[in-house]
């Protein structure tokens, strides 16, 4: 029974910051009275309409402007979309970062590159630990995901217990002993859970996500049957997958060559820290490589997303310094294409086929499983936790809606809220409702610039991309709009300038004639508009294209 | 037993023209001695690296330059990727075009718009017909596909019989009586087939493509259960799907409103020609629409690919003149996203969910089946036809390789060749080998321009898209390289010009200083290069971006 008091009048506030439709994936803020903590601090890769943008990071202006105590960031696991914005955010707000040992290793590398390792208070945390930051007591629990040392968090607050799963799936027979701690979830559920935030990424998929063991069997069989070399690519962070390849190589008497910078770095780090086991002498150096018979070799490489400069893409383009693909090679793409990378991956597969390799990928063989829970797994978590309130997180909007439908289909009386970036959910012991929305617009990173690419710049890039640019240079007398020299017209990305020279000539004549008959007392603003419209119309009539027209005045 | 003679010394030549990895999809040339015919004349939609390009069409310069008799084009069915280049190609080569009745209707509309209907010799052809053009006798046979009146062709040549399947699947229980004529394929196989060209689009998929009836059952159930309006989108050419929706509406006592120009046009055409059956009074006019209760209405609309100006996208953006999506609406996307359109479709789905609609799409319900054969169907065709030679067509390179593997797995002694655009396969009665490759580079259509966008223009667009442009205007004395006024720097798509004004100022100062100290007798070419490199380096150091730098000389 709820009583009147501060716990009723002061709600817990839940606010997702940054990350497109992928709410909460990047950064989820928990606020109570004067204190805040965040779960994760990830980056987004730009969608195709964010031309030239390198990264998208969470918008933390609310935290900065609030004047409240932002106490700590709790990282669920070491993937970029959960950790990648740390170098940007820590420059703005330097707070302790809690993470599991493997995430600690990966984040350290990242912070060292950004020269932030010295100034950052990075703290290890493990399942079973309990950390108190202000009014929040935070307790990690183990979850299965596609990188070891993944956790979810139980967050004890004055209003009640919240659970944030992070990315997870079940998998009762994991390759690296990392299953989701269902017993802990059941315990928390028995105690009573106020709020559950759970991973929606695969809420579209019915049934269960298969165990990593399925992939192990498939890879073993392919390696055993292959008559030549086997080249395997996967995400560099998918340590369990690398272990499966090591195991298959050992069982079939093959040695292993690792290529691609992030794969080499991650494998070395994982071997040093004991996340990977390889028998003595299994790994092949570059120098030894030419002497190993093809039927005795497995190559593990980066490039599962068709990244243009990755080792596998270079092999596919016959451009790798040490590995030339030949007939008899078997290439296994043990990964799925991240949305947006499909075309690059397809090109790599096509090029490998053209070189005569046998290529296996997830559409035609069981060489990959997802790292996220499907519908029946989501239901298991709901049934164990039985939360009062449920906020689906991760995934795009439709995934969150479907996840909410899954939760509602269970008739446990759970109330569901779908939040997007900047939405504020205010929760008391016996009520939950939306507070006032805060500004959490995307922050774009392009090169060194953080936030200096806005929607105007993007709109211009889109315009330039589709029909190019025509620059019209107008030499004018000082203080008048009188043409004082030859008009120059230059274009890029519009038409083949050699083949359509006459079109450029006619544009110059057209605008010159127009200006000669114009009023010379006009302001530059008016001339600018007139030239722009005249040229745009002329070129549209001639070509049905709409290049960007940029009039420039030069005073002579 | 082969005898020496012209049929041995003169090979039949098979040449795919245009269409990226999708060989033969767009246009497949059959050449014997001095005569040629083509199967299909389609267009490709540009891939994402073809910025601003509207369409890609086959390259027919080989036909034009050969001086041979190009006799006719045989169309397999009325889809754009098999007919869409006709308006462009017929302007270059006016030959008879053979097509089935529905394709005839669709092509007529297209040619009328292009003012080519009068000058084109469009001829109807039906399964069972036999047409002789020079040394080729061409006989269409019925195939099942996602548009009625689809055919494949048996092409009798002096060297032997060739079969081109066009796009096909099996489907023994089709919705519109259109199954693939297996008996005819068996007959041809018994007679002996020299060459089979068959659809590879879904060669990745094991098993069978489900029957269109599956979709019928799913749509009926959804319409019957829906409490409010049902909005269904599909490809405008997928007449059988529209019939399923009509049937479901009739059975549940609902009326039907059609919206979206191509859907209205196609439904009207199909009703007139008897491809669609609707009971009297089922269709709703715009005027009647507001008076129909939601639970008595089905809306059929364009927009299955998330096209920005389509009716469904406008509904999702609350911008449709007649239909406002409300809670209680059910929206069915009865189509799959064509590769490259995924992001647009996802955005539409997300927006519909945000408006409170229940949205069903192919990942979460059986509301769509593919129009192409899967592996077990491909095997049935191989086993009936038992060709001497096999050329996989349609689909990207990996699909053709997988299709070849499917054919080879049957051990029928078939020899397989994988062709890409411009490859020439020379076939005699007892041999097949590659001839000299011909030029068949893509031809890009952008607005009114055909072929005036080349790789230079595309490279520029890509450059502009990623980091924008910086124009540097240099007022110079005539005949020298001496600066004769203030240097102007203008940028678009690079940085926020207001926020980074100082950067533009510093760029101007930097280049001015550089030029003041430069040798004034330099040629413009040398100055141009120096300015370009100086500015590029300065901006890269400042921003880590690489905008296009365009120096322009103005003589004063």
Image (tube, coloured by chain):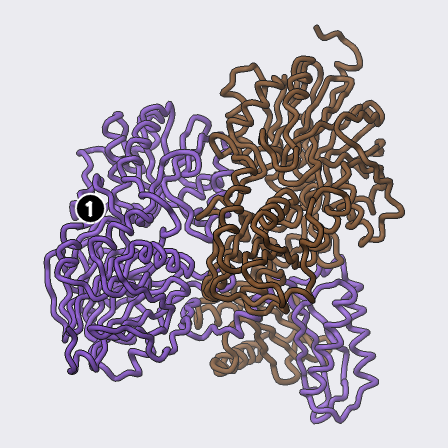
Chain colours: A purple, B brown
Residue at image position (23%, 27%) is: A251
Answer above or below: position of B517 versus A236: below
Front residue of A236 and A541: A541
User: Could one spot residue A108 in this view of the protein?
Assistant: no
Place residue A255 in its image quadrant: top left
Rendered location of residue A209, percent (x, y): 31, 43
Is the C terminus of chain B in the top left, top right, bottom left or bottom right quadrant? bottom right
Q: Up-down: is A333 above or below B264?
A: above
**Which quadrant is home to the N terminus of chain B?**
top right
Residue displayed at 57% across by 62% down: B313
Q: Residue at x 71, y 60 (%)?
A: A495
Disc 1 secondary structure class: loop
Count the labels in the image.
Answer: 1
For the residue pair B18 and B515, the one nearer the viewer reads as B18
A448 vs A164, left or right, is right
Percent across and percent down for residue B447 are 72, 59
Residue lying furthest front in this view? Answer: B253
> Dividing the picture into quarters, in which one does residue A234 lie?
top left
The answer, for residue A115, to whether it is visible in the render is yes
Q: Does residue B528 sit above or below A217 in this rendering? A: below
Is residue A219 shown left or right of residue A159?
right
| Between A410 and A116, the one nearer to me in the picture | A410
Q: Which residue is mark 1?
A: A179
Q: Residue furthest right?
A: B118
**Position in image of residue B450 (x %, y %):** 74, 53
Estimate how packed mark 1 is, as few (under 14), some (14 to 19) or many (20 or more) residues with alpha carbons within 10 Å: many
Q: Is residue A498 left or right of residue B245?
A: right
Q: Chain of mark 1?
A: A
Residue B501 percent coordinates (x, y)? 50, 82
Nearest the camera: A256 or A532?
A532
């Amino acid at each position: 029974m709820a009583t009147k008091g501060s716990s009723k009048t002061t709600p817990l506030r839940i606010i997702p910051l940054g990350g497109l439709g992928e709410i909460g994936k990047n950064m989820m803020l928990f606020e109570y009275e004067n204190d805040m903590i965040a779960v994760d601090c990830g980056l987004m890769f730009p969608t195709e309409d964010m031309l030239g943008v390198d990264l998208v990071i969470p918008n933390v202006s609310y935290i900065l402007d609030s004047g409240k105590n932002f106490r700590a960031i709790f990282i669920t696991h070491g993937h970029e979309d959960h950790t990648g914005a740390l170098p940007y955010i820590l420059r703005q707000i330097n707070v302790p970062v809690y993470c599991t040992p493997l995430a600690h290793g990966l984040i350290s590398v990242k912070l060292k590159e950004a020269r932030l390792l010295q100034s950052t208070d990075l703290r290890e945390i493990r399942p079973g630990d309990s950390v108190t930051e202000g009014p929040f007591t935070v307790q990690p629990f183990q979850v299965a995901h596609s990188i070891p040392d993944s956790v979810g968090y139980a967050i004890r607050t004055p209003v009640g217990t919240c659970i944030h799963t992070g990315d997870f799936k079940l998998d009762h027979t994991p390759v690296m002993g990392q299953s989701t701690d269902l017993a802990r979830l059941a315990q928390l559920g028995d105690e009573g859970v106020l709020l559950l935030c759970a991973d929606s990424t695969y809420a579209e998929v019915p049934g269960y996500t298969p165990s990593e063991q399925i992939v192990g069997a498939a890879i073993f069989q392919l390696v055993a049957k292959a008559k030549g070399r086997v080249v395997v690519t996967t995400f560099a962070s998918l340590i369990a997958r690398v272990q499966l390849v090591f195991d298959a190589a050992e069982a079939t008497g093959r040695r292993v060559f690792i290529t691609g910078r992030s794969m080499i770095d991650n494998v070395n780090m994982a071997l040093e820290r004991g996340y990977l086991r390889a028998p003595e002498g299994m790994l092949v150096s570059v120098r030894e490589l030419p002497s190993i018979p093809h039927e005795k070799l497995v190559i593990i490489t980066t490039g599962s997303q068709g990244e243009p400069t990755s080792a596998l893409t270079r092999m596919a383009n016959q451009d790798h310094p040490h590995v030339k693909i030949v007939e008899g090679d078997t290439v296994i793409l043990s990964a799925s294409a991240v949305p947006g990378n499909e075309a690059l991956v397809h090109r790599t597969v096509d090029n490998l086929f053209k070189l005569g390799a046998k290529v296996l990928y997830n559409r035609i063989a069981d060489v990959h499983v997802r790292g996220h829970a499907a519908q029946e797994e989501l239901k298991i978590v709901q049934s164990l936790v039985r939360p009062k309130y449920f906020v689906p997180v991760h995934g795009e909007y439709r995934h969150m809606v479907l996840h909410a439908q899954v939760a509602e289909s269970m008739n446990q009386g759970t109330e569901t809220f779908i939040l997007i970036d900047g939405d504020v959910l205010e929760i008391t012991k016996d009520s939950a409702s939306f507070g006032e929305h805060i500004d959490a617009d995307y922050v774009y990173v392009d090169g060194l610039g953080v936030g200096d690419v806005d929607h105007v710049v993007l709109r211009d890039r889109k315009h330039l991309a589709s029909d190019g640019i025509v620059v019209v240079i107008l030499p004018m007398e000082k203080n008048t709009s009188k043409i004082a020299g030859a008009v120059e017209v230059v274009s890029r990305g519009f038409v083949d300038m050699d083949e359509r020279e006459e079109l450029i000539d006619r544009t110059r004549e057209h605008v010159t004639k127009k200006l000669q008959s114009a009023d010379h007392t006009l302001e530059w603003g008016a001339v600018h508009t007139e030239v722009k419209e005249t040229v745009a119309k002329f070129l549209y009539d001639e070509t049905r294209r709409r290049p960007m027209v940029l009039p420039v005045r030069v005073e002579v």
